[in-house]
Each structure stands twice: as C-alpha cells, then as structure tokens.
Image: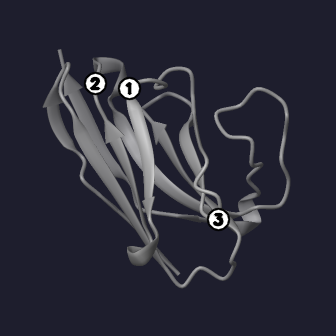
Amino acid sequence: VQVVESGGGLVQAGGSLRLSCTTSGLPFDDYVMAWFRQDSGLEREGVSCISWSSGFTYYSDSVKGRFTMSRDRANNTVHLQMNSLKPEDTAMYYCAAYRVVEVTTQKSFCPYIRRDESTFWGQGTQVTVSS
C-alpha cells in the first residue's frame, strides 16, 4: 500500500496551495480519504475528509469556506485546495486512507470514525504560511 502526498511549500498569508494525495494497493473498496495536520508541539488536527464512494466532503470549522477537497477517481488521487491561507495553517499535512466502519453523529471534522488498525498514512508534506 502506498499513500503519497505532494504540493506543500512556502506561501504568504492570503495565498493558495494545492495538496495532492495518491494511493495504490488499498485493501478495501469502501473507504475515506482524509487530511490531517500537525504543527510542532500541538496535537494532530483533522482538516477534511471525503467519502471515496459518494464524494461527500466534510471540513473542520477552522478551514471551512477556505479549503476544498476533491477526488480524481481515475487516478486514485484526492486534492486539497487551500485558499486564503493564514499563518495558523502552518503545519505538516498528512493524508490518510481508512476503511469506513462506523459513522458518528457527534460534532467532528469527519463523520466517518477512523480506526488505527485500518488506516494507511502518507509521509506528510510541509505547509508554511508566512505573515
């Protein structure tokens, strides 16, 4: 299984970046692709997710209206278009693919509950937003 991110970089506040994540060899058919981020010293934060089968997307409150997640089924790739970037968006961004097992109605960035044992992670891509 491979999960490979690309597209990070350095951008000024107010600018845009587009992240991509391509998967291969996933051992399940019904799954979710999600973006997480983590800055040094902080907890990992869920940013966005998309159901691979339905295409429904979900976002954390901190990025809603600025970030857009999409899928390219032909190339097993998801994109995260990040606009109006802020310095607080600076972090390592990780892509994850995980099996759809359970759905929650509790407030969350993504209604699909993730289990560690059925999650595949990418290596991460750094996003730095300068003020």
- The residue beneath circle 1 is 66
Q: State the residue at coordinates (83%, 47%).
A: 103
Closer to the chain start, of discs 3 and 2, is: 3
Q: Dots 1 and 2: beta carbons under 8 Å?
A: yes
Dot 2 falls on a residue whose secondary structure is loop
Please indicate whether residue 45 sits to the left or right of residue 117 in the image.
left
Q: Dots 1 and 3: beta carbons under 8 Å?
A: no
Q: Quadrant of the C terminus?
A: top left
Extreme residue in the front direction: 54
Q: State the residue at coordinates (46%, 37%).
A: 38
Closer to the chain start, of discs 1 and 3, is: 3
Q: Which numbered mark, 1 or 3, is in the foreground of this view? A: 3
- The residue beneath circle 2 is 85
User: x%, y% of residue 99?
Assistant: 72, 66
- Work out how far the residue at label 3 is from the one at label 2, CA to CA, in angstroms: 29 Å
User: x%, y% of residue 19?
Assistant: 31, 50
Which sits in the foreground, 47 or 69?
A: 69
Dot 1 falls on a residue whose secondary structure is loop
- The residue beneath circle 3 is 53
Residue 7 against residue 100 in the figure, above or below? above
- Work out how far the residue at label 1 is from the one at label 2, CA to CA, in angstroms: 8 Å
Dot 3 falls on a residue whose secondary structure is loop
Extreme residue in the top direction: 131
